[in-house]
């Protein structure tokens, strides 16, 4: 991993691209909530690793999750360490750091562009002519350089006086200067004067550039005026007192010496982890094997605890953690100091803070999720108080929490009911072996009975909404045993009650059926009188005296069932009583078998409908016979006419 002392660069996020071939698991935006809030408050705790490209862009080697959280926080730049490496080295390092966070970064660290440009001017400054450059700068308007030059002039004056004091014997040789060749000395003085003039000309030009550059930006800043009001948080969020650092292991006296904040106050301190303890109301577990915990551990190990934990004094005067349980746990193992904010909060506010701290975890089990939702809902309802009848009220607590969590109210209520379920049932939900609706029914049972159901699921006893619903009803009325629970789940209990068919009483002897009023009487069949002393005719045959001994069958009265029996048409007995003259031509006929089914395939027809259709068919047959008879009479008369 990069060195801690390395200063990261500010790289625009729009210039950072993914490595080719990298496919990261896309998480929902709400899973980045904790990291986004941390970035907004404290900035990026650990810089990302980038690889430069030839076109001035960059490829992201390590830190995809931090880059995504920075985008959600609407940051424009990202703290990054740029290493000059090949694409293969970047891919290999990405795989290596996943297994070992301490893996070294390949390639050479690229410095900031600003540092590379600022270095050469420092080296080009001449060291020999500092005293000559000072007068040029003091003419520009550098007061400090002028003050620094004054001692040099004072030092030069005594040197000149000493030279004059020692010069009297040498005054005569000075008059013979033309005889001596001091030309090289004059040339050097002339050169020095030229350099001074050049430096004096260059210095004002440089100062003019600086003067022009500074006033250009200054007016723009002065013209900008703040818009809006002062940002103020809720009561208790502003730090009212700094307690300083307390890094030594505390005694009981040291713990009691900490001041207790009043209502609306918040104290800040950096404490030894032994000052803090886990809150009694925080019953949520910490998954040390999760990727989030491992990443947080490595970050705290390298940079320490950056985000302060939130704590309060409980009834026993102990400082308990409400938010930051994992940070305190890691700091205790590493013996790192913990920045802490101490507030005075009641039990309901404390429970809401503890629940929120767990609800926004990226990975949370069903067991912890259901209990966090129940804790928050109960605390919010207690704070809201009892509703006044007739007064206008806002949305229900369940609706508010469901909207915040992005789920329906029904699903929220089912999850809150799972707070009464055992861990074994919730683990089956996390493993995908139990739907939430089935676990909801099981949550109505006693804990020991829930564990029994979990054991039966482990041996592949099938559970569903139907049998768990029956089990819930049985548990409300009877005492359950392990065998009874298994019988209910397997459908053996309670025994199914089969209704016995009621005995059908034989129908009373019916009177002779009357002819239906809708049956038209055939006009071509005369009604013969019954002979006074004629014996009974044969079954199903009615003699007609007018036509001789040829028997004729009367129009039947059909009484078929819905299901035809496999039998041929069997005529029933028909008796003609002498005293029943109006119904003497009615014959009861029962039609059965496939022969009837061919004409009436719809078995849902009632007997009355079948009877009506038979009479309709007979009427159509009679009308056709009438027409045929009329045609025969007409054509017969034409044939009997005279032949020309």
Image: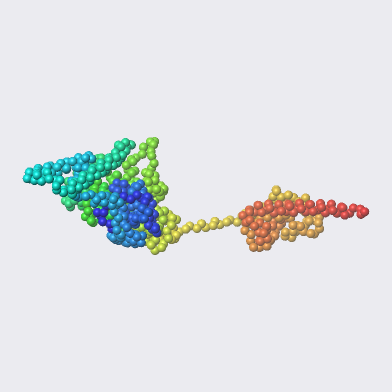
Q: In the figure, 141 relative to 120: above or below?
A: above
Residue 96, by quadrant, is bottom left
Q: Is residue 155 visible?
A: no
Q: Is residue 641 left or right of residue 362?
A: right
Residue 233 % position (x, y):
29, 40
- Residue at the spot x=64%, y=63% of the render? 566
Residue 364 % position (x, y):
34, 54
Please, which residue is most extreme toward the right here?
644
- Residue at the spot x=74%, y=60% of the render? 538
Residue 599, by quadrant, is bottom right
Residue 305 % position (x, y):
25, 51
Q: Quadrant of the N terminus?
A: bottom left
Q: In the figure, 147 relative to 522: above or below?
A: above
Residue 238, by quadrant, is top left
Please, which residue is most extreme toward the bottom here?
459
Q: Is residue 37 visible?
A: yes
- Residue at the spot x=16%, y=43% of the render? 148
Q: Is residue 585 left or right of residue 78?
A: right
- Residue at the spot x=78%, y=54% of the render? 531
Total numbered labels placed on residues in the image:
0
């Amino acid at each position: 991993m990069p060195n801690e002392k390395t200063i990261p660069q500010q790289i625009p996020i729009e210039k950072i691209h993914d490595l080719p071939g990298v496919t990261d698991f896309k998480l929902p935006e709400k899973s980045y909530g904790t990291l986004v809030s941390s970035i907004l408050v404290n900035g990026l705790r650990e810089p990302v690793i980038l690889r430069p490209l030839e076109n001035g862009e960059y490829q992201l080697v390590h830190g995809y999750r931090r880059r995504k959280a920075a985008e959600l926080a609407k940051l424009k730049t990202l703290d990054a360490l740029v290493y000059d490496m090949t694409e293969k080295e970047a891919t290999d390092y990405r795989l290596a750091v996943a297994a070992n966070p301490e893996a070294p970064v390949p390639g050479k660290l690229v410095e900031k562009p600003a540092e590379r440009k600022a270095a050469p001017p420092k080296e080009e400054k001449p060291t020999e002519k500092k005293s000559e450059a000072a007068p040029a700068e003091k003419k520009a308007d550098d007061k400090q350089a002028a003050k620094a030059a004054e001692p040099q002039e004072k030092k030069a004056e005594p040197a000149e006086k000493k030279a004059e004091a020692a010069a009297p014997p040498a005054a005569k040789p000075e008059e013979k200067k033309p005889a001596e060749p001091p030309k090289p000395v004059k040339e050097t003085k002339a050169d020095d004067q030229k350099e001074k003039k050049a430096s004096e000309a260059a210095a004002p030009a440089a100062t003019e550039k600086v003067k022009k550059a500074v006033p250009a930006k200054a007016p723009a800043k002065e013209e900008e005026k703040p818009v809006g009001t002062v940002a103020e948080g809720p009561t208790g969020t502003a730090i009212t007192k700094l307690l300083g650092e307390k890094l030594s292991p505390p005694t009981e006296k040291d713990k009691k010496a900490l001041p207790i904040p009043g209502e609306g106050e918040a104290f800040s301190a950096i404490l030894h982890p032994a000052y803090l303890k886990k809150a009694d109301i925080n019953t949520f577990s910490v998954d040390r094997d999760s990727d989030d915990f491992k990443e947080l551990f490595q970050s705290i190990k390298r940079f320490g605890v950056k985000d302060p934990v939130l704590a309060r004094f409980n009834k026993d005067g102990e400082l308990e953690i409400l938010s930051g349980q994992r940070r305190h746990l890691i700091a205790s193992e590493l013996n790192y100091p913990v920045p802490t904010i101490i507030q005075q909060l009641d039990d309901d506010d404390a429970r809401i803070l503890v629940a929120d701290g767990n609800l926004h975890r990226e990975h949370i089990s069903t067991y912890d999720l259901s209990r966090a939702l129940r804790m928050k809902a109960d605390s919010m309802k207690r704070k809201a108080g009892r509703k006044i009848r007739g007064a206008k009220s806002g949305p229900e607590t369940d609706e508010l929490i469901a909207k915040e969590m992005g789920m329906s109210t029904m699903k929220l209520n089912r999850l809150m009911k799972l707070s009464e379920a055992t861990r074994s049932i919730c683990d089956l939900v996390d493993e995908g072996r139990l739907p939430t609706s089935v676990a909801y029914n099981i949550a109505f049972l006693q804990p020991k009975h829930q564990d029994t159901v979990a054991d039966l699921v482990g041996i592949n006893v099938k559970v569903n909404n139907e049998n768990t619903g029956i089990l819930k009803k049985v548990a409300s009325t009877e005492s359950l045993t392990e065998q009874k629970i298994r019988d209910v789940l397997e459908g053996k209990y309670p025994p199914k009650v089969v209704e016995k068919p009621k005995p059908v009483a034989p129908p009373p002897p019916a009177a002779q059926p009357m002819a239906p009023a809708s049956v038209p009487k055939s006009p071509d069949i005369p009604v013969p009188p019954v002979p006074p002393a004629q014996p009974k005719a044969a079954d199903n045959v009615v003699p007609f005296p007018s036509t001789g001994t040829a028997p004729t069958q009367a129009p039947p009265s059909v009484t078929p069932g819905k299901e035809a029996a496999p039998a041929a048409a069997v005529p029933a007995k028909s008796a003609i009583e002498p005293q029943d003259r109006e119904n003497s031509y009615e014959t009861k006929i029962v039609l059965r078998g496939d022969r009837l089914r061919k004409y009436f395939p719809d078995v849902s027809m009632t007997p009355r409908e079948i009877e009506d259709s038979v009479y309709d068919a007979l009427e159509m047959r009679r009308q056709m016979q009438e027409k045929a008879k009329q045609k025969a009479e007409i054509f017969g008369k034409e044939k009997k006419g005279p032949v020309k």
